[in-house]
Image (cartoon, helix red, strand yellow):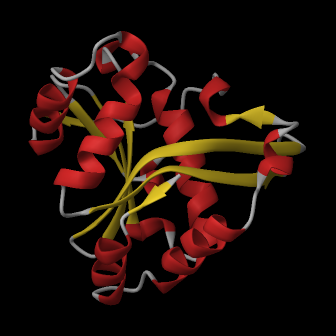
């Protein structure tokens, strides 16, 4: 996990994101590893929530295109994109954020790592870099899981959270409250 402290302070003071700042600062001092030892990972959820993401090309795609040019191999892509956003994007406050929650329906814990957290337009954006995003069938389930976890952990209402997965070509955005 990496936090850009000046941006986090500036962005969280402009909205109701004090819970997010508290959660991220808590993570820096505490290890949530025990929550990742069992249960299901968000990235392996095979559910297909009924949501129609808005698809467009935006600044995230442009930044990803630039960042990918510096990757020497495919294994570096994720960390390069995350670091590039953290350094160069004004709204990105943290990357690789661990989240977890107990799913009553599934009867087990679900955990994962949010690639990119942004605060913009008085909303929290959860972004997940997905190479070849167009082919990602289960990405909405994964990112919806992140939204529910961060909503609970940081005390942010779901209607203030937006989710997106993207690559250098397309950006797919939806609200977790629109999932049926």
Tally of marks: 0
Does residue 60 appear anywhere in the picture? yes
| Left/right of residue 16 with respect to residue 122 in the rendered view | right
The answer to which image quadrant residue 148 occupies is bottom right
Image: 165 above or below 10: above
Residue 152 appears in the figure = no
Could you say where residue 22 lies in the image, as x and y percent from the top left?
57, 80
Please state the horizontal and vertical placement of residue 144, each as a whole percent of the image: 53, 45
Q: Position of residue 88 (x, y in %)?
A: 17, 52
User: Residue at horizontal 75%, vertical 43%?
Assistant: 110
Name the quadrant containing residue 6: bottom left
Q: What residue lies at 18% left-to-right and 27% top-to-bottom? A: 170
Q: Nearer the viewer, residue 134 or 112?
A: 112
**Left or right for 106, reference 74:** right
- Work out whether residue 114 or residue 121 is closer to the camera in this orientation and state it: 114
Q: Is residue 64 above or below residue 5?
A: above
Hey, which quadrant is residue 105 in on the image?
A: top right
Left/right placement of residue 89 relative to residue 43 reads left
**Residue 108: % across, % down:** 87, 43
In the image, is residue 7 above or below residue 10? Answer: above
Identity of the residue drawn at 57% across and 66% down: 151
Q: Relative to residue 84, is residue 109 drawn left or right?
A: right
Which residue is drawn at the image coordinates 25% and 47% (left, top)? Answer: 85
113 and 103: which is toward the camera: 113
């Amino acid at each position: 996990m990496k936090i850009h402290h000046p941006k986090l302070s500036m962005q969280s003071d402009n909205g109701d994101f004090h819970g997010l700042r508290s959660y991220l600062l808590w993570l820096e001092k505490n290890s949530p590893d025990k929550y990742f030892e069992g249960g299901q990972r968000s990235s392996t959820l095979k559910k297909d929530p009924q949501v129609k993401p808005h698809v467009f090309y935006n600044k995230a795609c442009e930044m990803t295109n630039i960042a990918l040019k510096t990757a020497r191999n495919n294994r570096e892509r994720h960390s390069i994109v995350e670091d590039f956003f953290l350094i160069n994007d004004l709204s990105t406050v943290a990357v690789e954020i661990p989240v977890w929650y107990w799913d009553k329906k599934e009867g087990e814990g679900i955990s994962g790592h949010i690639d990119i957290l942004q605060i913009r337009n008085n909303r929290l954006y959860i972004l997940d870099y997905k190479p070849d995003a167009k082919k990602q069938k289960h990405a909405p389930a994964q990112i919806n899981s992140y939204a529910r976890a961060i909503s609970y952990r940081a005390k942010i209402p779901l209607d203030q959270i937006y989710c997106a997965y993207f690559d250098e070509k397309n950006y797919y955005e939806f609200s977790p409250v629109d999932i049926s």
